[in-house]
Amino acid sequence: MNKLHTLMFTVGLLAGASAHAQLKIEIAGVGSNQIPIAVAAFADESMAPAQVSAIIKADLERSGVFKVIDAGAMSENDPVSYSQWKARGADALVVGSVQKLADGRFEVRYKLHDTVKTAQLSAMNQAAQPKYTRLSAHKIADDIYEKLTGTRGAFATRVAYVSENRGARDYRLEIADADGEAVQVAVRSNEPIISPSWSPDGSKVAYVSFEQRKPVIYVQNLVTGGRKVVVNEKGSNSAPSWSPDGTKLTVALSKDGHTQVYSVNADGGNVRRLSNSNGIDTEPQYSADGQTIYFTSDRSGGPQIYKMSSSGGNATRVTFNGSYNISPRVSSDGKTLAWVSQRDGGYSLYAMNLASGQELRLADGATEPSFSPNGKYIMYATKTGGRTSLAVVSVDGRVKQRLTTQAGNIREPNWGPFQK
């Protein structure tokens, strides 16, 4: 089949227009001990292409950490009565304004006040092109989250996932903001696409395409729209995962018989075997420090999670409960392992404290997990009503969200890194 008919990809993705339906987010749970925060409508925000305060509110509510209180309309320069806001039950107050500059950009200003300490906690001024107004709002929400929780916010990040309509043979690798907005198509194909994986700098996504009638690993540049074949060895080429420094990928290859774990330079050179078993070793994932690789292996009779040095060698078994454990993912702080376990007749998402070995069942009907870059949430695929959609759960299991779309199935999520 002609490659031009098989695969189409956008050039200059970041500047491209949205080409697909937006994701809809439904919140199904909230955290304990929510922080009550008043968010005012920003002065003159109606002139901007996006309502900044509404985006901030939605981000904070979606996190499950905050109880948002409507504060009417205020500018960051208006006097603040801390006692008044404290009496209204708010521990913090967000105020701001929007101004259109002579060069066409919009300047967004904001201040965060602590009504308990009766002091200003933070302030930010951002000038951005109109299309990045939403990003300015997400960055403010990130700042609020970090100042009030001590953990970096992940609202200004992006997610990659696969949207598929098998009947129409339409497969798309799509990129969206973490709130499901600004969906753009990075790759479109008549053949299946699986296993997207973000590069650490957020400029590229590695993925597997079947356009050559076998699984081949590609890397898509999201800035230029260019792409290249990275691994096309004999047999199956699958499960790419980037090293934390972006110089290498771990992959699963069957070039020497059984599928095993290999490393390869980001440009496709220096293919080197890391695992050595008589079974199938697959789904490799680097730890955050790059020193360890977690992977799935059936060397003990059924699929279990193992770990080994990133340079290869002997492997140590990690999971022992249940006879079927796959899809390991490690949080950015290296403290938590997430994976999918088949128990009680279904697939469930589990998380393990790697220091204590304690397990927590987070969600049922789950596959393909991916951590948020701050390690506080896990996105996964789930099937309900005959359709596959995405969902998010906090690592303590309290906060749950579902991301759905009107058309097709969405699956294979991969949460991108923090924006620079």
Image: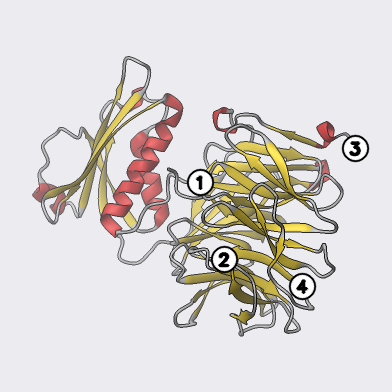
- N-terminal of the pair, mark 3 or mark 1, is 3
- Between label 4 and label 2, give the one nearer the viewer: 4
Q: Which quadrant of the rendered structure holds the N terminus?
A: top right
Q: Is residue 128 left or right of residue 244?
A: left
The relative height of residue 215 versus residue 328 in the rendered view (above or below) is above
Would you name the residue on which mark 3 appears?
1
CB-based contact (under 8 Å), mark 2 and mark 1: no
Would you name the residue on which mark 1 appears?
201
What's the amino acid at mark 3? Answer: Met
What's the amino acid at mark 2? Answer: Arg
Q: Which mark is residue 221?
A: none
Cα distance in 3D space between marks 3 and 2: 36 Å
The outermost residue toward the right is: 1
Label 1 CA crowd tier, 10 Å (few <14, some 14–19, many 20+): some
Q: Find residue 270 and report its image quarter.
A: bottom right
The relative height of residue 140 versus residue 306 in the rendered view (above or below) is above
Task: Looking at the picture, tell me which residue is in the foreground, 93 or 412.
Answer: 412
CB-based contact (under 8 Å), mark 3 and mark 2: no
Label 4 CA crowd tier, 10 Å (few <14, some 14–19, many 20+): many
Would you name the residue on which mark 4 appears?
280
Cα distance in 3D space between marks 4 and 2: 18 Å
Cα distance in 3D space between marks 4 and 1: 31 Å
Task: Looking at the picture, tell me which residue is in the foreground, 317 or 95.
Answer: 317
Q: Is residue 49 left or right of residue 343?
A: left
Cα distance in 3D space between marks 4 and 3: 31 Å
- N-terminal of the pair, mark 4 or mark 1, is 1
What's the amino acid at mark 4? Answer: Ile
Label 3 CA crowd tier, 10 Å (few <14, some 14–19, many 20+): few
Q: Is residue 391 left or right of residue 104?
A: right
Q: Which quadrant of the rendered structure holds the C terminus?
A: top left
In percent of width and height, residue 180 lies at 53, 44
